Image (cartoon, grey):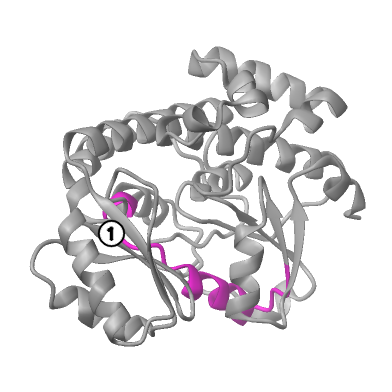
Amino acid sequence: MRYFYKIIYMNKYCFIFPGQGSQYVGMGKDLYEKYPQVKEIYDKAEATLGFPIKKLSFEGPETELRNTNNTQPAILVHSIACFEVLKERNIQPELACGHSLGEYSALYCAGVLSFETALKLVKQRGELMFSEGLRKPGAMAAILGLSDDIIIDICKNIDGVVVPANFNAPGQTVISGEPTAVKQACETASQKGALKAIMLPVSGAFHSPLLQESAESYKAFLKTFEFNLPKFPIIPNRTGVATAELTEIQKSLEEQLINPVLWTKTILTAKSLGFTNFIEVGPGKVLSGLVKRIAPDLTTILAGKVEELEKIN
């Protein structure tokens, strides 16, 4: 089931789900007050997670919301709430993908993960990444204005561990690794003509070999949960190729923490299948901006607030 014919998907929706960096204090509050099903989702999530996800999402403080062990469940729940509102209005996708953490929202959307399973997996993922950042501090940086090949070459020639972590859009790549190596890569990138090389406010080297120990622990944790066949294809971060094969989906989750997010390839794959309409389901508009950089002819629609959801027919 790896190959999908373009003609099938003309004028259909691809749902894209955001990851870390899209969170903001107050997200989900308007949904909670407007839709009964969203209230139920947040109440159930809080009971399952065992911490005040509503207060954290609706009121902050931002410093706590920014911690990856809090950010990840908060974005997941918000994205699922938005999806359920769309679903009730019979607005559903024929393809889904998510950026890093967002892949879990996509898998819930496709029916691969139950709500409870998605919550437990993301909670564990966030806690592992948070503790890894404390135990083995890493760094990440965004480099703008250089090609993927140049950045790959820069990373290969730096002493220490530094690798491309997110291929977000042409000329927009995130690198990850040991703090000293990441800083050296940024300096080299600037020397080679990068428009910007910006250190990001994170404590962990996400999507890099430094998370190998966490990835092994998480792989064992994943095996304790049940996965369902997807209702439609998804595009995993690890491959950037549409699939409906459960073994491939599971393998991608197992290896996601130590592999780069192939977001440019993901969007181009969706486009090659005939998708032209992309709905960003969840907080913010980061992914919509990336889609426009990758393929300006594609249409993006935001679905993270009440007024945005109400506009979609």
Mark 1 closeness class: few <14, some 14–19, many ≥20 residues within 10 Å: many
Q: Secondary structure at mark 1?
A: strand
Q: Residue at x 84, y 47 (%)?
A: 309
Q: Position of residue 46 (x, y in %)?
A: 58, 17
Say if 74 sits above or below 54 in the image. Answer: below
Q: Residue at x 29, y 79 (%)?
A: 189
Q: Nearer the viewer, residue 141 or 240?
A: 141
Say if 286 sits above or below 190 in the image. Answer: above
Q: Nearer the viewer, residue 277 or 64?
A: 64
Magenta span: 256-277
Residue identified by numbered label 1: 176
Q: Is residue 6 visible?
A: yes
Residue 206 is one of the magenta-drawn residues: no
Q: Position of residue 121 (x, y in %)?
A: 42, 32
Q: Amino acid at mark 1?
A: Ser
Q: Position of residue 20 (x, y in %)?
A: 49, 47
Residue 274 is one of the magenta-drawn residues: yes
Q: Can you say which quadrant of the picture contains the C terminus?
A: bottom right
Seen in the image, is 26 located left or right of residue 96?
right
